């Protein structure tokens, strides 16, 4: 009988293989993406630089939705969730650095939050009067 324990074990194994690939990809992420971003700025292709940043934000959002770290956190293997969150934070840090030429204050606040691990709202909601 295929029970919850087997499902959790298979899920963790599948997820850990994906994480191994992501860690390998991170070694190239910083170098390759930084070169591409700098080239956009040097060529005054700011629209392409911003488009690239928003693609990274969207890809990270999709990755988090797909991997469901809130579900992994409920499982017994806590090392895996630490690795997952580490990968997300790495990507958030680089996205924040790339945003610096366009949103310097927001970029600084975000990098400060990552360094101090104290969160604050970067983009407060705008209340509308009905």
Image (tube, grey):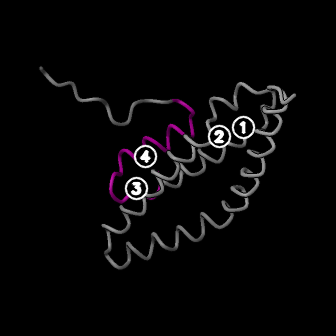
Q: Residues at badges 2 and 3 in contact (C-beta under 8 Å)?
A: no
Which marked residue is nearer to the observer: mark 4 or mark 3? 3
Quickly name the residue at label 1: 82
Element type at mark 1? helix
Q: Residue 108 carries which label?
A: 4
Residue for point 72% across, 52% down:
18
**Distance from label 1 to label 3 (Cα)?**
25 Å
Quickly name the residue at label 2: 85
In the picture, the quarter occupied by the C terminus is top left
Element type at mark 4? helix
Per the rendered image, the range of residues in magenta is 96-118
Q: Of the residues under marks 2 and 4, which one precedes in the sequence?
A: 2
> Farthest residue in the top direction?
130
Determine crowd level at label 1: few under 14, some 14-19, many 20+ residues with C-alpha closer than 10 A.
few
**Distance from label 2 to label 3 (Cα)?**
20 Å
Q: Is the magenta stretch mostly helix, strand or loop?
A: helix
Q: Of the residues under marks 4 and 3, which one precedes in the sequence?
A: 3
Q: Residues at badges 4 and 1 in contact (C-beta under 8 Å)?
A: no
Q: Residues at badges 2 and 4 in contact (C-beta under 8 Å)?
A: no
Q: Of the residues under marks 2 and 3, which one precedes in the sequence?
A: 3
Element type at mark 2? helix
> Farthest residue in the left direction?
130
Apparent side of residue 57 relative to residue 50 in the rendered image (left or right): right
Q: Is residue 16 magenta?
A: no
Between 103 and 75, the one lying in front of the other is 75
Q: Of the residues under marks 1 and 3, which one precedes in the sequence?
A: 3
Apparent side of residue 3 relative to residue 30 in the rendered image (left or right): right
Tell me residue 19's x, y (percent). Answer: 72, 50
Tell me residue 121's x, y (percent). Answer: 39, 31
Quickly name the residue at label 3: 54
Determine crowd level at label 4: few under 14, some 14-19, many 20+ residues with C-alpha closer than 10 A.
some
């Amino acid at each position: 009988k295929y029970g919850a324990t087997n499902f959790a074990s298979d899920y963790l194994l599948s997820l850990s293989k994906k994480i191994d690939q992501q860690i390998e990809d991170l070694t190239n992420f910083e170098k390759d993406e930084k070169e591409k971003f700098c080239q956009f700025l040097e060529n005054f292709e700011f629209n392409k630089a911003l488009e690239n940043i928003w693609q990274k934000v969207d890809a990270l959002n999709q990755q988090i939705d797909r991997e469901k770290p809130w579900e992994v956190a409920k499982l017994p293997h806590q090392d895996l969730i630490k690795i997952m969150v580490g990968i997300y934070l790495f990507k958030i840090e680089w996205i924040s650095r790339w945003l610096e030429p366009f949103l310097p204050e927001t970029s600084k606040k975000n990098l400060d939050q990552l360094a101090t691990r104290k969160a604050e709202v970067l983009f407060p909601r705008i209340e509308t009067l009905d």
